[in-house]
Image: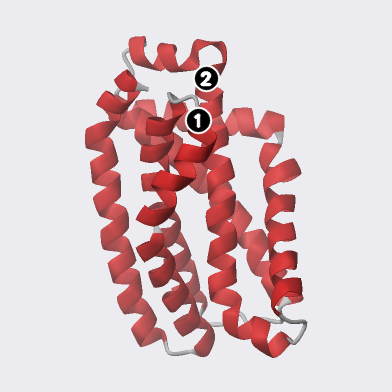
Amino acid sequence: MWRDAFAVAGRDLRIEARSRVAVNQVVPFAFIVLLLFGFALDPDRGILQRVTPGLFWVTVLLSALVVVQRSFAIERSDGGRDALRVGGIDPAGVFLGKGAAILVVLLVLEVALLAAVAVLYGAPLAGWPLLVVSAVVTTVGIVAPGTIYGALASGLRVRETVLPLLFLPVVAPVMIGATRAFEAALEGSTGAGWRWCGLLAVFAASYTALGMLLFEPLLEES
């Protein structure tokens, strides 16, 4: 399973490195979303600093939709999905590999977005241990259900609209926890933030285990 996961993740990341979709499309898209939020709310940096955690994670979530759809678009080209089904690759390994590749792309994006909110919103980036841990567990909590519903929607003709309808309600609790953890880190009250991190970790672990169990029938049906 782990060998298959590394192989799938390596393949997806090599495709991404060659196509540069994240660099040329996802990162500019995320920056534009941050700018629009800034214009829509208020140029007053005091307001923007208070809402930075929520805006940051909404931007990551919207970008994750693009990355997940891109990940499964790879499988629709040149019979990639059929090759996964008949190639003897462990379905749990496929789930972990595709999720790992999406995770890497989103974590790189989040580093760029943290720099952007510091510059554009004047957000004071403090509480780095909590920021880093909450970012990782939140991203896993986004990626795991995203990979499940991405596989489920990839076989549908209306997948571009079905994926957000399936995915966004599920990750609403993740957005709440991630926002509270980031608020605690930026305000220096890390005790409350670590409790939110624990809840996020439970959600991420639960959906990761669920994806490993369900990915085989999802591949068959997609």
Quarter of the image with the C terminus in it: top left
**Which disc, if any, is residue 158?**
1
Name the residue: 43% across, 65% down. Answer: 175
Return the x and y of residue 153 as percentages of the image width and height.
Answer: 42, 32
Q: Nearer the viewer, residue 114 or 176?
A: 176
Q: Which residue is mark 2?
A: 76
Quarter of the image with the N terminus in it: top left
Residue 70's place in the image compared with 4, above or below, is below
Name the residue: 56% across, 58% down. Answer: 60
**Which disc, if any, is residue 144?**
none
The image quadrant that residue 200 belongs to is bottom left
Side (left or right) of 207 relative to 54: left
Q: Nearer the viewer, residue 93 or 56?
A: 56
Which of pointers 1 and 2 lies earlier in the amino acid sequence? 2
Return the x and y of residue 72 as percentages of the image width and height.
Answer: 50, 29
Residue 112's place in the image compared with 63, above or below, is below
Assess disc 2: are there few (<14), some (14-19) or many (≥20) residues with their C-alpha within 10 Å of its C-alpha. few
Name the residue: 24% across, 52% down. Answer: 206
Q: Nearer the viewer, residue 30 or 1?
A: 30
The three-letter code of the residue at mark 1 reads Val
Return the x and y of residue 212 as percentages of the image width and height.
Answer: 26, 36
